[in-house]
Image (cartoon, rainbow, N blue to C red):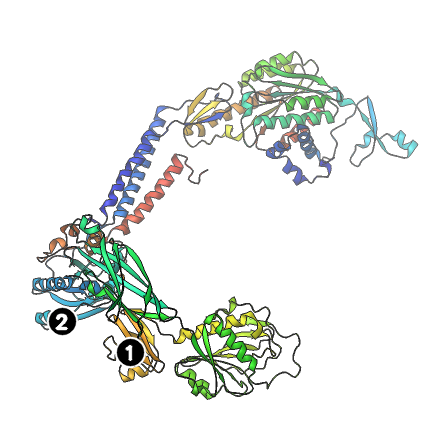
Amino acid sequence: MVASVMPMDVANRLLKPEVLARLGSLDLVARTVVDGVTTGLHRSPHFGFSQEFAEYRAYNEGDDLRYVDWNVYARTDRTYIKRFQGETNTAVTLLLDASASMGYGTPVTKMRQALHLVASLAYMTRKQHDALGLAIFDETVRQYLAPSARPDALVRTLARLERCEAGAGTDIIEALGSLRASMTRRGLVIVVSDLYADADELLKALQPLAHHGQDLAVFHVLDQQEIEPSMARISALRDLETDDTVIVDPGFLQNAYRTKFSAHCESVQQACRRIGADYTQVMSSEPLDAALQGFLRFRERRGR
Amino acid sequence: MNLLFPAYLAGLLALALPWLLHRFSDQRPQELSFPSKRFLEPTAPPVSRTRKLKYRVLLALRVLSLLLLCMLFAQPWIASQGSSGSQRMHHLVVIDQSLSMRAGDRWDMALEQARDIIDEIPEPDTMELIGFERTVHRLADDSESVAAVTQALSAMQPGYAAADYGTLMQHLDSLAADAEVPVRLWLISDEQKSAMPAQLNALYAPRIAQMTARSVVSGLQRNVHLRAAASSRDGVNVQLSAQLLSSVSVPHGENAGSATGTDAQAVTVQVSSADQLLAEQQTTLVPGELKSLVFDQLILPPSSNPQLQVSLREADALSVDNRVDVVVRTDNPMPVTLLHSERAVSANAAVFLATAMETDSLARVDIMEGNAERVPPDTQHLVTGRDLQTNLGIDVLNFVDRGSNALVFRSDRTGQPESPSLQGSEMGAVDESHALSLGDMDWAGARFFEVAPLALFSGDRVLLQTSEQQPILVERATARGRLMILNDRLDGEGSNLPLQPAFVTLMQSILRYFDANTALPDQVVVGSRFVLPANVQVLDPAGQPLLSLDASARSGAIELDEPGMYSIVGVRGEHSLRVVLDAEEADLTLVEADQMGRWQARHSVAASGQTAPDGSTVDSERQAATSPLLAQGPNPSGVALWYFILPLLLLFLLLESGFANRRLDVRRDGS
C-alpha cells in the first residue's frame, strides 16, 4: 500500500485539495486520502468483536491480545488473530448535495471537495466491510444506491460520483423527506452539503432519521469567499441556483453579511447537536485529513 | 508669469479625456457568481452617492495632473524684482566676423548698425566692442572714450573662418559673470543657420540679462560654394571633380517661397591652367542642392607646378569662394632606402624586404651601401641591418632624430644558442593595441628557431614576442622620428618569418605607420591647427615667409587664417598646402525667425522696459516670445517655476494612483 510507506509530510501535501483535484481519479483520491489519514494509528479501527467469524490473520504488533486465538497457538505454535464480521451490520449511506451552489469555490469548488470527501468516506467504509449506499440530490434525489455489502459496491459508488456535477437548485428538506422512506435499515447516514436551508426546517428533516435510529453525521462544505467575501467595489452577485442578480455594497459584505452567515452556521450546528448528529465544517481550501479524523473519532465514540 | 512655450498649453485639450472617461465610462458593477442570495441584501442609494464622490476626487486629481504636465512643458517663469528698465547696464556690442559676413553688403550694414547702437547707448551705461568668428576678440571698451570704440570699429574686417556661437556665448557669459551691473548683449550677425546648433537653447548664457539680435541680411542673396580635387596616375591625364553647394538667404519677413527664393540657378564651372582655359561645364542648381561635376579628359600642360584653377563664371553674393587652386595629386610610391652597411647582412634579407615593401606599389626600395648619413634628404624611411649586440649605430639614431623613420633588423649571429631548436618557438604575445594592427595578422605558421637575446631599454615597447618571451619586434622611444627593431636576421634560417604571408602585411603596415608620422597634409580648412615638422618654412600665397627663423627651427602647431595655396619648404623639398574655406560657413541659409526670437527672448526678461534703438531689424514678435528655458544655472533675471511644478505633479500622480487602486480596484500591473 502506498500510503503505509509514505512519509507524513508527503501525505499531508498530497491531501491539499488542489493537489487532489489534479489526480483525476476519485478512486486514487480516496485511497490517497484515507491511507494518509489512517497511517500511524496504533489501534486498527477496521475490525471489531462479533460472533460471526470472518478469517484468521497473522498477529501484528499493536493488535488487541483479546483476539488472539490461543487454541491455534497451542497447536501450531504461531500467533493468529481472529477476525469477525461484526461491522458489516452497519449500513453507511452517503448523501451528497449536488446543487448549483456547490459549484462555487476556489482553489477547488465545493463540489470537487465534497466529491473527494464522499469518495474517501466510501473507500473507508468498504475497507471496514460496511454496507455502502449513496444518494445524490439537489432539488430531488438524482441518484440512489441502496446500502450494499457486495464487493462491487465501492466501484459502483465511485462510478456515480465520477459522473456527478453541480446541477440545479437545492431543496435538502424535500430530498431528505423522500430518502427517509428508502432508508429502512439502521446505520450511519452522512450528509455532505453546503446546507443552504433554514436551520429549523433542516432540523425537521433530520429528526425523523435520528428517531429511526440512524446515526447522523453532517459535513458542512464551505468556501472562504462565501464566509468572508472580499469584493472591493460594488458588485452584482448572481445566485448560482436561481440566476437572480443582487447588487450589493462591499460594506454590506464586510459586515452584515458575515454576521448573518455566521449566525446561520451556528444555528445549523445547534440543530445538529439537538438531534445528536455530528457536525463538521469542511473548507474547500483545506485538506480533508482533519475532517476524516474527526469522523473516525465520531465512529469510535459510537462504537460502530 | 510668462511662458516659454505657450504652444504646449494646447495640451490642455487633453483635459477632456478624463472628463469623458468619468462621464461615459461603464459604471455598471462587475458581475460575479455567488453560491446563494439567501443572505444578501440589495445596495441602498446612499452607498451610490459615496461612490460618486470618490470618483470626483479622482477626476480632480487627474485633471490637476494633466494641467501641471502642460504647464511643465510650457515652462513658466516669473521675472525677479531686481530687473528693471531704469537700471544701469553694461552693453556688449558683438559683431560677427566670419566668412559669410563678406557676402553682399553685410559687413557695411554690420558696421552701420554697430555705430547706431553705440550712439544710442545712454550715458551712464558702459559698453565693449567684441568681434568673433572661430575665436572671440575683445577689441575696445569705453573706459577711455567712445571715440576709441568707434575707431576700433572702423578697423574691424571680416575674416575667413567659420563662426562659433558656442564659444562666443561661453565667453560672453564669463564676461557677464565678472560685470558688476546687468549685461545687455547686442549681437550683429547674419544669423547663419549652419553656424548654429540645431537647438538654439544650447546657446543660453544665464548671466546675460538681455539680448538683442540684429540681422545684417537685406534682400535675397545667393551663393555657390566651389571645391575641387584632382588626381593623375601618369602626371599628364588628369581627372578633376568639382562639388557645388548652392544656398540662398531670404531675409525674415519676405516670402521665402516666392520664385526668387527657390528657382534654379545656372552655374558654369571653368578649369584653367596658367590662364589657359582647359574645360568648361554648365549646370543648374537649386538652393540647398549639392552637385558634383567630373572633368575626366584634362591634359595637364607641361609645367613644373602641377596646379589647376577651378572657378565659377557667374558672380554671386560671396565671391571669395568662387575660385580654388587645385594641386594635381600623383600616386607615387613612397621612397624607402635599404641600407647595406654591414657585410654580415644576408642577401636573402634584402630580397624578402624589397619584395614585401614593393607589393601593390606601396613603396620604391632603393638599395645602397654606406651609413645613414649618405641617405638622400627626401628619403624619410630607412631599413637597415645592424649588430644588435653592440649598438644600433649613431648614424641611424641621427637619421631618426631628424624626424625620419628607421626599421633596424638583426645582422649579427653572436649570442645564438648552441643547439638551435628544431621545433622552434611560436609567436607569443602580440600587442593588439598598437596602430600596426598586429592582432589582425595571422601568426599561426611563424616559427623562430634561433632567437638571440635583445637588450631592452626603458621606454621600449615590445610589440611581438615568442612564446618563450623573446622580443621579436620592438618600438624604441625617440625624440622625434620613429624607430623599430626587428630581432630577426630575415634570412629565412633563424626563423620562417620572412616566408610567412604575415611578413608582407607587417612590412606594409610598418611603412604606413612611418608615413603617417612624417606626411604633411595636402589640404586644411582655414583656421584649423596642424603640426609642422622642424626645420621648415611656410610661404603664404604671395610667397612671403610666415615663420620667424626661431619658429622654423622648432616643430609646432600653426594656424593659417587665409585661404590659398601655401608652400612648406624644408630639407626634403617643397610641399604644396591648400588652405580652403569651410563649406558650411559658405552656406548662407538663415536660421528660422522663431528660433532666433526664442533664443534672444530667453535673455530678454526686461525687454518691455527697454527702448530699442531705431533701425532694429528684430521683429516685435520676437520680443513678445519671452521666457527662460530649464535653467542650468543661476538666472539673475528670472525664476523658473518647474522646480515647484515637478514635485507637485509627482505628488498628484502618486495620489491618483493610490486612489485609483484603492477605490476603483484598478490593478496597474495589468493583473
Q: Which image quadrant is residue A294 in? A: top right
Q: Amino acid at mark 2?
A: Ala
- Which one is nearer the viewer's eye here, B121 or B620? B620
Q: Count numbered badges in the picture.
A: 2
Mark 1 is surrounded, within 10 Å at the Cα level, by few (under 14), some (14 to 19) or many (20 or more) other residues, namely many
Q: Is residue B454 left or right of residue B276?
A: right
Q: Position of residue A183 (x, y in %)?
A: 67, 14
User: Mark 2 falls within which chain?
Assistant: B
Q: Is residue B665 left or right of residue A18?
A: left
Residue sitting at x 75%, y 20% = A150
Earlier residue among tags 1 and 2: 2
Q: Is residue B21 left or right of residue B174?
A: right
Height in image: B663 above or below B374?
Answer: above
Q: Is residue B380 visible?
A: yes
- Which element is circle 2 on? helix
Which residue is disc 1 drawn over? B538
Which residue is disc 2 drawn over? B155
- Which element is circle 1 on? strand
User: Mark 1 falls within which chain?
Assistant: B
Q: Position of residue B421 (x, y in %)?
A: 65, 77
- Which one is nearer the viewer's eye here, A54 or A297? A54
Q: Quote the CA–CA distance across marks 1 and 2.
A: 27 Å
- Which one is nearer the viewer's eye here, A177 or B130? B130
Q: Which image quadrant is residue B596 in? A: bottom left
Q: Is residue A298 visible?
A: no
Residue sitting at x 76%, y 27% = A47
- Residue contact between numbered discs 1 and 2, judged by CB atoms under 8 Å: no
- Which one is nearer the viewer's eye here, B525 or A53? B525
Q: Which image quadrant is residue B62 in? A: top left
Height in image: A246 above or below B7?
Answer: above
